[in-house]
Image (spheres, rainbow, N blue to C red):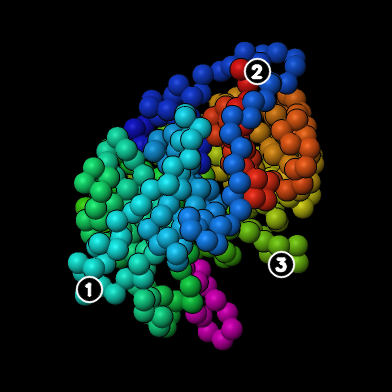
């Protein structure tokens, strides 16, 4: 796939050519003063229980080669509706996925006619993909529905997983879109019944196009609560386990090579809320919400080679530019030198909104922050 593979879900450390313009360094990076912040958009993500109904996506997903954010869906009263935000025009859009017409034409598959989530949405290739499942409650089938955007129709379904006797539950993760292969990348996390009260977990990374292709399968020791972190240039995906305060043992991050399917794992702190991959491929950055410590863990050997004490209660973390990391806490935006982990600046979140108390669900993009504060949602341009 080479460097043309595009990250949709979260920003990569080095973006492929089609997104490179978003990573041009801005003048403030060499200056002593912190960068300016511009709130480009403010929206409400509060649930609406009467038409047009709306339930926010958990988490938000960036699609269409970094140009669009999937905000949420209509659910039962508006079963085909999804809502998107165009990051260029700063305008929300409500679209209708033609799922009911497909369900009516294919009664042999008893679909629950409600869009459950968005996997891929690429207007250049006219490719969309949504999450649906059938009505079977004992052995429920989980599908990716292929949405032809040009013809505005659902072409077919691809079976992803079955929840049944051996599988307690199945969770899906949108990973990204590969325009070279015209494939949608999806991660499955399955909880499987073990002996006695124990449960085991299995992660399967799939590429779904004309067929369903398995890239790799591995067995983490714990649940994966982190959304996948993508390195499009180096063809890797990072998954993180989650360990709470009273959990014994060690949580781990797992780095998957998209070409070979090889998986490499390193230890990370408990209550890790922020994860990033270094562009040189040598380390994983992990931020602990419990201790406020940011560590750089060598992918070879798993040793911590850098650490920095920061504020607690942070959530969003990632690369703002190739040289700058951004940590988002309820009180501040912390700008860090990616090579040294030295602080470059700190910006109070009260300049965005003085009422911000919680930032879970926020995303760091190139030169931009998608800031979520409970039901309030801000698109914040950083630099200028």
Residue at 48 percent across and 35 percent down: it is: 91
Distance from disc 1 to disc 2, alpha carbons, whole Å, reads: 58 Å
- Dots 1 and 2: beta carbons under 8 Å? no
Most distant residue in the front direction: 51
Residue 305 in the image: state x and y as whole percent. Answer: 68, 38
Q: Which residue is mark 2?
A: 29
Looking at the rendered image, the disc whose residue lies closer to the viewer, 1 or 2, is 1
* First in residue order: circle 1 vs circle 3: 1
Instruction: Let me know if residue 45 is in the magenta part.
Output: no
Q: Which mark is residue 107?
A: 1
Which segment did they paint magenta? 190-201
Residue at 75 percent across and 15 percent down: it is: 32
Left or right: 367 in relation to 231: right
Left or right: 235 in relation to 365: left
Q: Helix, strand or loop at disc 1?
A: loop
* First in residue order: circle 3 vs circle 2: 2
For the C terminus, the image quarter is top right
| Quarter where residue 144 is shown | bottom left
Q: Which residue is mark 3?
A: 248
Q: How many marks?
A: 3
Instruction: Let me know if residue 198 is in the magenta part.
Output: yes
- Dots 1 and 3: beta carbons under 8 Å? no
Classify 50 as above or below 61: below
| Mark 3 burial class by Cα count in 10 Å: few <14, some 14-19, many 20+ | few
Residue at 51 percent across and 80 percent down: it is: 194
| Mark 1 burial class by Cα count in 10 Å: few <14, some 14-19, many 20+ | few
Distance from disc 3 to disc 2, alpha carbons, whole Å, reads: 41 Å
Q: Is residue 278 visible?
A: no
Looking at the rendered image, the disc whose residue lies closer to the viewer, 3 or 2, is 2
Residue at 52 percent across and 45 percent down: it is: 229
Classify 139 as above or below 27: below
């Amino acid at each position: 796939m080479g460097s043309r593979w595009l990250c949709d879900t979260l920003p990569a450390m080095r973006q492929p050519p089609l997104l490179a313009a978003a990573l041009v360094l801005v003048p403030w990076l060499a200056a002593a003063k912190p960068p300016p912040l511009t709130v480009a958009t403010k929206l409400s993500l509060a649930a609406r229980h009467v038409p047009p109904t709306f339930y926010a996506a958990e988490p938000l997903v960036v699609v269409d080669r970094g140009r669009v954010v999937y905000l949420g869906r209509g659910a039962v009263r508006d079963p085909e509706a999804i809502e998107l935000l165009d990051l260029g025009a700063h305008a929300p859009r409500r679209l209708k996925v033609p799922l009911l017409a497909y369900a009516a034409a294919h009664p042999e598959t008893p679909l629950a006619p409600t869009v459950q989530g968005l996997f891929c949405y690429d207007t250049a290739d006219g490719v969309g993909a949504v999450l649906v499942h059938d009505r079977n409650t004992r052995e429920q089938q989980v599908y990716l529905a292929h949405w032809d955007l040009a013809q505005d129709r659902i072409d077919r379904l691809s079976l992803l997983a079955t929840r049944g006797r051996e599988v307690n539950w199945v969770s899906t993760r949108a990973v990204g879109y590969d325009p070279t292969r015209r494939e949608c990348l999806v991660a499955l996390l399955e909880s499987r019944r073990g002996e006695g009260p124990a449960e085991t977990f299995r992660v399967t990374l799939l590429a779904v196009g004309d067929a369903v292709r398995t890239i790799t399968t591995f067995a983490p020791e714990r649940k994966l609560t982190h959304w996948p972190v993508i390195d499009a240039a180096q063809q890797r995906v990072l998954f993180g386990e989650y360990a709470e305060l009273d959990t014994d043992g060690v949580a781990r991050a797992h780095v998957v090579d998209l070409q070979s399917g090889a998986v490499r794992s390193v230890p990370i702190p408990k209550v890790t809320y922020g994860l990033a991959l270094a562009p040189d491929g040598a380390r994983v950055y992990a931020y602990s919400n419990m201790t406020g410590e940011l560590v750089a863990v060598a992918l070879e050997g798993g040793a911590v080679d850098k650490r920095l004490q920061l504020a607690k209660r942070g959530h969003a973390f990632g690369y703002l530019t190739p040289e700058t990391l951004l940590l988002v806490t309820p009180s501040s935006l912390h700008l860090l030198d990616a090579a040294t982990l030295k602080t470059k600046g700190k910006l109070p979140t009260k300049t965005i909104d003085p009422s911000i108390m919680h930032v879970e669900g926020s995303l760091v993009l190139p030169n931009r922050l998608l800031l979520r504060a409970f039901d309030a949602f801000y698109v914040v341009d950083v630099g200028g």
